[in-house]
Amino acid sequence: MKKIPRPALYGLLAEFDTSAAVVAAAARVRQDGYRRVDAFSPIPVEALSEALGFRCSRVPVIALLGGLAGGIGGYALQYWTSVIDYPLNVGGRPLHSWPAFVPVTFELAILGAALAAVLGMLALNGLPRPYHPVFHVPSFALASRNRYFLCVESADPLFDAAETKRLLESLSARSVYEVPY
């Protein structure tokens, strides 16, 4: 099996002073056709996700499927144990007494939805991820304090190091850094 060589450059990281500047830069970069773009901010910036072109999350669908699986599994387990595997006639009640199955079915549906939501969120976010190439840039430590960063990855089809750097500098970036792998 042939190993595909990884490029030496992960991407370019532009540093901005304000949230408005990084939102405008993200919108412009997206408008110019770049799709492999990520942003880093010390505070939530709602307009940033729109500027980056994020889609709706699939986590609600995953949670719904997990809830349905938990509820159906809980009901099926109770039905199987009460009717098929170990039927007990208690006081002449029917073996399939569905009102007695409701609390456990509800609880397992909630458990299934919660577990599916957490595991789905972790999987879709690519977590846990203890390492990211942007950590090589020393000033990236300011992303948790008062600076905003926009990263254009080299995996983007339109990425050209010189041209992308000129674009990011033209967007009033405080500075632009090369991000090695």
Image (tube, helix red, strand yellow):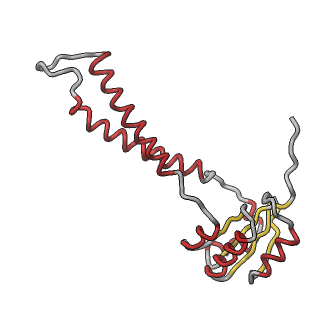
Q: Residue furthest left?
A: 91
Image quadrant of residue 109?
top left
Image vertical order of residue 97 relative to residue 59, above or below: above
Image vertical order of residue 26 relative to residue 55, above or below: below
Q: Is residue 52 left or right of residue 114?
A: right
Q: Residue 14's x, y, as percent?
A: 75, 74
Q: Is residue 62 left or right of residue 22?
A: left
Q: Quadrant of the N terminus?
A: top right
Image quadrant of residue 86?
top left
Image vertical order of residue 72 relative to residue 118, above or below: above
Residue at x-position 12% and y-position 18%: 92
Q: Residue 167's x, y, as percent?
A: 80, 76
Q: Residue 49's x, y, as percent?
A: 59, 67
Residue at x-position 21% and y-position 17%: 88
Q: Residue 169's x, y, as percent?
A: 80, 80
Q: Is residue 89 left or right of residue 74?
A: left
Residue at x-position 14% and y-position 22%: 93
Q: Quadrant of the C terminus?
A: bottom right
Question: Which one is in front, 76 or 111?
Answer: 76
